[in-house]
Amino acid sequence: MSNALDMAVTALLDANKHPLREEIDALRMIILDADGSIEEGVKWNAASFRTTEWFATLNGPKQVKEAMIILHAGAKVKGADLKGRITDPTGMIKWLGADRGMITFPSRADIKVKQADLKTLIQAWIQHI
């Protein structure tokens, strides 16, 4: 069973009329389904996710080319080296630094195909947050 969607996030997405809303909603559900400790909220004017720290943010209102998740190690840089600790057999993560990665999805179909691998990556990521 998934955690509940945050109504503030839903209201933000409704207000922005984001063109990738269907994709963003699909990613919201996958991330929340990954672990019972994950909560959703608004951070950086976008749908974001946390356990004890913020660890993932979805497309903001100006990011409209493709669905995207930014994985990070909290709101403040801590120098964590996650790149060497996260196993990514499918090569989904484009590393932006040692503690930050980006995953993009060109279509809703791509999200559906990769949802199990994404869930596994999210589970691995939160073990290091």
Image (tube, grey):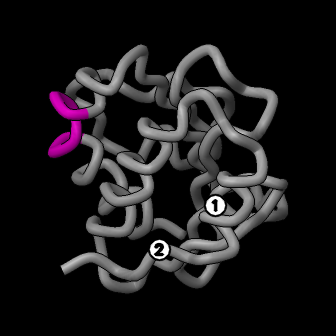
**Residue depicted at 77% across the width and 61% down the height:** 78
Q: Would residue 115 appear left or right of 36 to someone viewing this image? A: left
Is 86 placed above or below 74 here? above
Q: Nearer the viewer, residue 111 or 11?
A: 11
Q: Position of residue 76 (x, y in %)?
A: 84, 63
Label 1, label 2: how far apart the Cα atoms are:
11 Å
Res 84 → quadrant: top left
Res 75 → quadrant: bottom right
Is 50 placed above or below 46 here? below
Crowd band around label 2 with a 10 angstrom C-alpha radius: few (<14), some (14–19), many (20+): some
Residue type at mark 1 is Ser
Question: On the rendered image, what quadrant is the N terminus found in?
Answer: bottom left
Q: Nearer the viewer, residue 108 or 100?
A: 108
**Residue depicted at 60% across the width and 64% down the height:** 10
Q: Which residues are magenta?
A: 112-117
Residue type at mark 2 is Leu
Total numbered labels placed on residues in the image: 2
Q: Position of residue 91 (x, y in %)?
A: 32, 22
| Disc sitting over residue 48 in the figure | 1
| Disc sitting over residue 12 in the figure | none
Question: SS class of the residue under badge 2?
Answer: loop
Question: SS class of the residue under badge 1?
Answer: strand
Is 115 placed above or below 123 here? above
Circle nearer the viewer, 1 or 2: 2
Q: Nearer the viewer, residue 98 or 10?
A: 10
Name the residue carrying label 2: 5
Going from N to C along the chain, the mark reached first, 1 or 2, is 2
**Residue depicted at 64% across the width and 46% down the height:** 99
Question: On the rendered image, what quadrant is the C terminus found in?
Answer: bottom right
